[in-house]
Amino acid sequence: MRAKLRNLLGAVPLLAWYGWGLSQEAPTFLDRYVLLSTSARVDALLALQIIAQGAVIAFTFFLVVLLLVRDVPRARARGAAAYAATMVGSFAIASFLFLPAATASVPLFAIAALCITLGSALSLYTLIYLGRSFALLPSARRLVTDGPYRFVRHPLYLFEEIAVLGVMIQFAQPWSLIVMLVHAVAQFARMHYEERALTEAFPEYAAYAARTARLIPGLY
């Protein structure tokens, strides 16, 4: 019971962060929806943006649910480096908010919306399989090898990066690209620490890792 209580208390800052994010996204989503529904013609780009934002909201809401019900970890990464990688990997993308918007073409903004939609939807799909094993700090709660985990060891990181690519396109270069690269480096570090924790907790993880690609089947 004490471990579960500590687990829940540790999620409070994250719950506050994601709750704040939802409070910012929801009004914009509703404004866009009202604008599209009252428009005399169908704006394809606006419709894509609404779908993309809806996928982000659904993904974030599911994260909140999982933080409330997640299991107590069997093992977790230790040390300042693992913690720093987690913080940068989780929150570096908030830096996009401080950058000016890009002046990209409509097709490029459409590509951005598609990337956000695809990345968020696939991330949500992955979370369904990850379930109560979800965590930000690299840790081991349960060994998941089904669903997208049959093909790669870190599908959630892969799909999140697709969504981040879409966000990056919408902001001024080269600064948004730098933010994305910093985020990607931190994510690679998180994969390393997560694999260490899983190896410590589950002896069968080594065999799973040997037969399953890290991110891209047949390549890496």
Image (cartoon, rainbow, N blue to C red):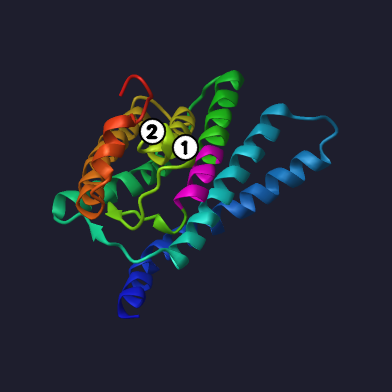
Q: How far is mark 2 from mark 1, CA to CA?
A: 7 Å
Location of residue 218 (image quadrant): top left
Which range of residues does the magenta coloring cover?
A: 121-130
Q: Which residue is mark 2?
A: 152
* Magenta: main secondary structure: helix
Nearest the viewer among 194 and 110 is 194
Residue type, label 2:
Val
Residue at screen point 19% across, 52% down:
200
Q: Which residue is mark 1?
A: 148
Nearest the viewer among 29 and 163 is 163
Vertically, is 203 above or below 1? Answer: above
Residue type, label 1:
Pro
Residue at screen point 26% across, 32% down:
210
On the rendered image, what quadrant is the C terminus found in?
top left
| SS for callout 2 | loop
> In the shown orientation, is residue 98 left or right of residue 117?
left
> In the shown orientation, is residue 81 left or right of residue 157?
left
Give the x, y percent position of residue 161. 41, 34
Residue at screen point 34% across, 70% down:
7
Give the x, y percent position of residue 130. 44, 50
Q: Are marks 2 and 1 in contact (CB under 8 Å)?
A: yes
